[in-house]
Image (cartoon, coloured by chain):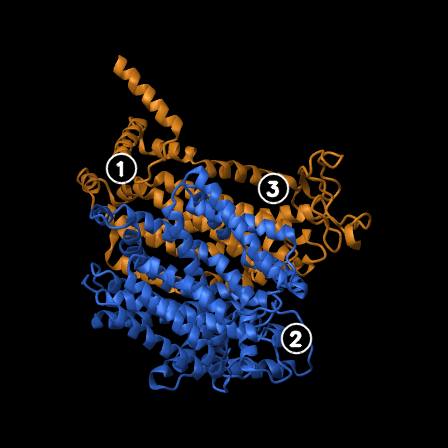
Amino acid sequence: MLAYVMRRLGALVVILFGSSFLLYNLSAYSTDPLADLRLSDAPNKEQLILTLTRELRLDLPPALRYFIWLRGVLGVFVGNPNFGLTRENEPVIDAITGAIPTTVRLVLVATFVAIVLGIALGITSALRQYTRFDYGMTFFAFLLFSLPIFWVAVLLKQYLAIDFNDFLVTAKITPGWIVGLSAAAGFFWAAIISGTRKRVTLIFIGVFVANSIFLSIISATEWLAYPRLGPIAIAVLGVGIAYGVTYLSMGLSDKNALKTTLLMVAVGTVSYFPAQAVLDSNRPRLGMLVLFLILLAVSVGGAYIFARIDRGPIIRTSIITSTLIGVLILIDKMMQAWRPFIESDDVNYRPVATIGQSTIWLTEVPFWVRVLDFAMHLILPTIALTLISFAGYIRFSRGTLLDVLNQDYIRTARAKGLTERTVIMRHAFRNTMIPLTTIMVGDIAGIVGGAIITERVFGWQGMGTLFNKAINSFDLNLLMGVILFLSTLAILANLIADLLYSVLDPRIRVGAGK
Amino acid sequence: MARNRKEVEIVNEANENAIANKETEGLSQGQIVFRRFIRHRAAMISVIFLFSLIAIVYTSLDWRLGNKEKPFVIPGWWKYHFEDMPELRYADCPGGTVGCPTIDAVPFFDGDGMSLGEHPFGQDDIGRDYLSLVMRGAQRSILVMFIIGIIAATLGTVIGAISGYFRGWVDGVLMRLVDFIITVPVIIIGSVIGFHYGNKGAAFLALLLGIFSWTGLSRLVRGEFLTLREREFVDAARVAGAGNRRIIFKHILPNAVGVIIVSVTLLMSGAILTETALSYLGFGVVAPDVSLGLLISTYQDAFTTRPWLFWYPGLFIIAIALCINFIGDGLRDAFDPRQRRRLSRKDKANARKLESRAEVA
């Protein structure tokens, strides 16, 4: 294994060398940093050209210049890398390290949402193969495949930001919207659950009525203008989460698992009160960590008290439950910051941001307002990136699950009399995840590439902006820095994907080929 | 009860197999694939729609060939050319805007019938007819798509075939080349190329983009060749005295053609999005030429006041890409040997009828 990793890392260096040489020459031959100087009518034009030529070593052919650049880069191995200077005489490495966090924030959230939603929809679609829901999902995925992201982005800006912000001023949902949204929800659930015509009609009516009542309450209480959860809502949602997670992972017949997760709901709800003090203190990050560790410890402890068999899976179930409840507490904390956030002068009742990565605060604001601000700026780019990338996950997880369901071991599992839930979640779903994991890791590099357009549309200052700037100002050092970063990421992601594959699927042994 | 249902299902499955087998009796592989494709409804609709769209788009504008002063004109069905500058329409536009679309797509409910009017898609800032601009943009985008598709298909197939068939050092060198290119995201390579060569015209840009888009396909083809070259029919051909070239093109390639066609269609739908994205970033087709991405990029700020400038080019991109994706899906199903068609009730009834007739006879 180690030998394999070493060999792959060696290959990585060679590939990086080759691709950077290729791109360096490609860009060097096609750029002319002197172009605008040649056209200028400055009196000291000759002088300027000479200086720039000497600075950028333009007297040497690109192939030789590449090796000068490479000598600086190879400094990585002696701890003194030199990626050169940008045209503004800033070290390239500073520009890139400054841009990475922004891009990572953008890409990570979008990838996470895309994976979770994509897999959920894909798997539901596969379990309902050849139903209306399945055909609908297929069409939806193809539609998303065909959408240009910059086009979607403009639509999102108009309807999800500008119009939604206008709506938030009153936060009154009109009856037309209530009926429309409830009907959509009704169709969605009726299509997923399916069954006889009578059952489908009942489900539709049930969901429609429940949704209408829910939305009417939301509208009447102006909840969207004054959002809050509070301990009661957290407890109610928590019980729902506990039942849902237990059903998916252990089955509701496992009373020990149910007891443990319900205990976690109780602990989580009680911890809501001390959590407020901790999160409001001047070290909120540390507070979050402590809170999370406590919940973790209680979930492990609870599982030990209630469960004699299946301790491992029950611990896992209760950890998932308590993490979700922790997230609820954090969401509640952000909701508490909502009024100060939108009432501040810098936001001025336009909470969903269309441009930029954060508000430039003119006054000092509390920690949670800043966190909320980051979240509000993330919404639109995340939706845009998610819409584009999760179509792939829908299609892929559907296809993989259908393949897995045709395998003999699924037939065996059914023949043993296991419940459908166990067959799907324990036998089929896990084997579906193996190829999916490798796809996910491999995708990350591609999404970073796609983020270039997203950053441009939404005015974020990340890798994409650097890249645009590098091309437009003929900045070869900066351009090569960005490209080197992206290609290293791509190759490393591929390596990790291969290694993960062999870890997840013991039948595959990496490096056994030779 | 439940067991009974399972048994019925199993019997049904056997029946369906028999029906499927009967249907493919005496047909060549190509015929089977073709029939399966014809039956894929979404794909067939897409094929018809795409070809009509291409026909409409390419016959819409005048083709002005030859020199600028006295061009040789092949007239199109639309009265304006994208370089014409008709007068900007001020009258009867909503909200005091100018150059609004005159298309009336509502049939007879609103009193008058459907009509195109003077400027169906409206006009841009300086009065150019937007229908002709969108048509021109669609022409460019489709052209770019096909050029990239053809170049990538040729290069990818040939390089993948050589690499998978000969293996050894040839394979090593070619696959390292693939590694070099594949590590850099397409949009990056495209931008570097597009920034410098975008002004040389869409066709030239497509040519260069094609040179960098064959890598994924070549890996797939190589994989196919690596397995196919070990098969008995290849040995048989070799024993019969066939040369390398003959084995590659006459024996192995026809067996790999499914994989190639499917991935080329998907590559083409990716290509049209790449082209529009590059044009949007300003690294693709540049003014005075027109492309769909460029139109969106130019008028995205006009969305609130004059949304038609934004909707029409976007809808054309989506329509083209969606058609190609559905065609690709249909082809994948058609080429997939494991794919069994879901039998409709009519098929089953037909089969039952045939069976009973056979029994009577």
Q: CA distance from mark 3 to mark 2?
A: 52 Å
Q: Quadrant of residue A490?
A: bottom left
Q: For chain A, what colour was chosen?
A: blue
The answer to whether residue A421 is above or below residue B250 is: below
Q: Which residue is mark 2?
A: A343
Say which of B320 and A241 sits in front: A241
Mark 1 surroundings within 10 Å by alpha-carbon count, few (fewer than 14), some (14 through 19), many (20 or more):
few
Quadrant containing the N terminus of chain A is bottom left
**Tint applied to chain B in the drawing:** orange
Front residue of this view, candidates A465 and B203: A465
Closer to the observer: label 3 or label 2? Answer: 2
Question: Residue sitting at 38 percent across and 60 percent down?
Answer: A243
Q: Chain of mark 1?
A: B
Q: Secondary structure at mark 2?
A: helix
The residue that mark 1 highlights is B6
* Total tally of numbered discs in the picture: 3
